[in-house]
Amino acid sequence: MNIEQVIENGKFSVKEKRYAIMKTKRPLMNVFAAVCDGREITLIMEEYEAKHSLPRDDIIEYDDGWRIITFEMNLPFELVGFIAAVSQGLAQKGISIFSISAFSTDHILVKEERLDDAIKTLEELGFEQVKLEQAHA
């Protein structure tokens, strides 16, 4: 599978809300993502919910102001170098990312103040931004 063709035909969307990435004492439901790797628990959830419904005693570390970019395409397991190509393009512009993969879809989080730069960079790489309504149509 050719990574250049995948990127050239690739689409991404941007979630409207801001998200927080947290290291917590326990996993929770109703989050965008939870990673429990045996050493720590990382939660990604809407910033508003994190600030207003999460017990402060459960939070070990907290970082907010993130926006989620979802690659609106099924990425097969045999595809090699997708996140590497994305992260390299963004790294060349000094844009830090937090990446997370679902079974067939990849997501990256970027700080809101770098979102416009990230979108422009992804478009320069060959991706097309779609609105969330289009992505799920």
Image (cartoon, rainbow, N blue to C red):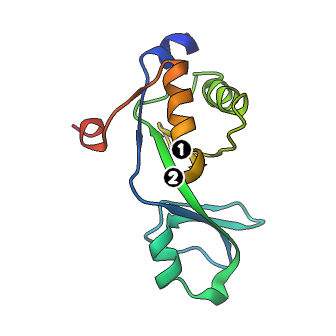
User: Alpha-carbon neighbours of circle 1 within 10 Å: few (<14), some, or many (≥20)?
Assistant: some
Dot 1: element: helix
Q: Residue at x 41, y 30 (%)?
A: 73
Residue mark closest to the camera, 1 vs 2: 1
Residue 17: horizontal and vertical position, in percent? 42, 59
The vertical placement of 56 against 72, above or below, is: below
Are the two marked residues, 1 and 2, in contact with CB atoms closer than 8 angstroms?
yes
The vertical placement of 9 against 109, above or below, is: above
The answer to whether residue 54 of the structure is visible from this angle is yes
Q: Residue at x 72, y 36 (%)?
A: 94
Q: Which residue is mark 1?
A: 115
User: Alpha-carbon neighbours of circle 2 within 10 Å: few (<14), some, or many (≥20)?
Assistant: many
Residue type for callout 1: Leu
> In the rendered view, does 71 fall on the left or right side of 97?
left
Q: Which residue is mark 2?
A: 67
The vertical placement of 121 against 35, above or below, is: above
Judge by depth and name the residue closer to the eye, 15 or 93. 93
Q: Quadrant of residue 30?
A: bottom left
- Gap in Å between the C-alphas at discs 1 and 2? 7 Å
Residue 125: horizontal and vertical position, in percent? 55, 20
Q: Looking at the image, which residue sits at the far left?
A: 137
Judge by depth and name the residue closer to the eye, 80 or 14. 14
